[in-house]
Image: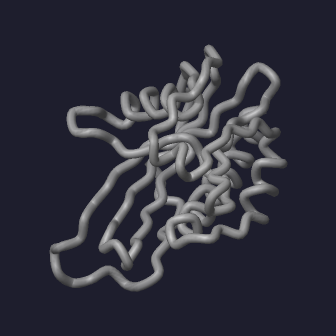
Amino acid sequence: MELLKEIKDKEYPSDTTLKIREASRAILFDENDLIPLLFVSKYNYHKLPGGGIDEGEDKSQALVRECLEEVGSEIKVIGEIGKIIEFRSKWNLKQISYCYYGKIIFKGNPDFTEKELSQGFKIVWLPLKEAIFKVENDKPENYEGSFIQKRDLEFLKTAEQVVREKQ
């Protein structure tokens, strides 16, 4: 998968204590060409559905599970957007996010975790251009949100190019 960008607030440390987390994310289109974004109201930013790959899962299995949990939707992956590597020095974390695009096959209700509920997660459905505008103009109010904004904006803008090429 093509590396789209590296986002870091400092250079990687030279020691080997770096935690590594892999995650799958998706830009999904419903029957009206709207995509779901998760609005994290407590910290004032939007993010793509997706999350960490659990032990024993591959990227695809994690994505299907996360989309069912966060959006309440069954999905069909159509293609790749790319990957982004983040280094969050405050947490000594290197995160590799793999992003895909696809279609929503069935819409249900999300099953947010207690943490997601406490952060005020809500689903908003927007056309791709509006989603880009929303994420671009967010003003995240926490450390994590500033990384997520940069990462997901890159994924959304790349998706716009990919979708245009497919038409």
Q: Is residue 22 above or below residue 64?
A: below
**Nearest the camera: 141 or 30?**
141
Q: Position of residue 122 (x, y in %)?
A: 66, 41
Q: Is residue 39 above or below residue 79?
A: below
Taking the image as shown, residue 124 lies to the left or right of residue 93, namely right
Q: Residue placed at 23% from the left, 71% from the top?
A: 18
Q: Residue placed at 39% from the left, 56% from the top?
A: 96
Taking the image as shown, residue 26 lies to the left or right of residue 21, namely right
- Looking at the rendering, which quadrant does residue 166 occupy? top right
Q: Residue placed at 61% from the left, 53% from the top?
A: 155
**Nearest the camera: 52 or 117?**
117
Q: Is residue 135 above or below residue 33?
A: below
Q: Position of residue 137 (x, y in %)?
A: 78, 65
- Looking at the rendering, which quadrant does residue 163 occupy? top right
Q: Residue placed at 54% from the left, 19% from the top?
A: 74
Q: Position of residue 88 (x, y in %)?
A: 41, 73
Q: Is residue 26 above or below residue 136?
A: above
**Nearest the camera: 104 or 160?**
104
Q: Position of residue 60 (x, y in %)?
A: 40, 31
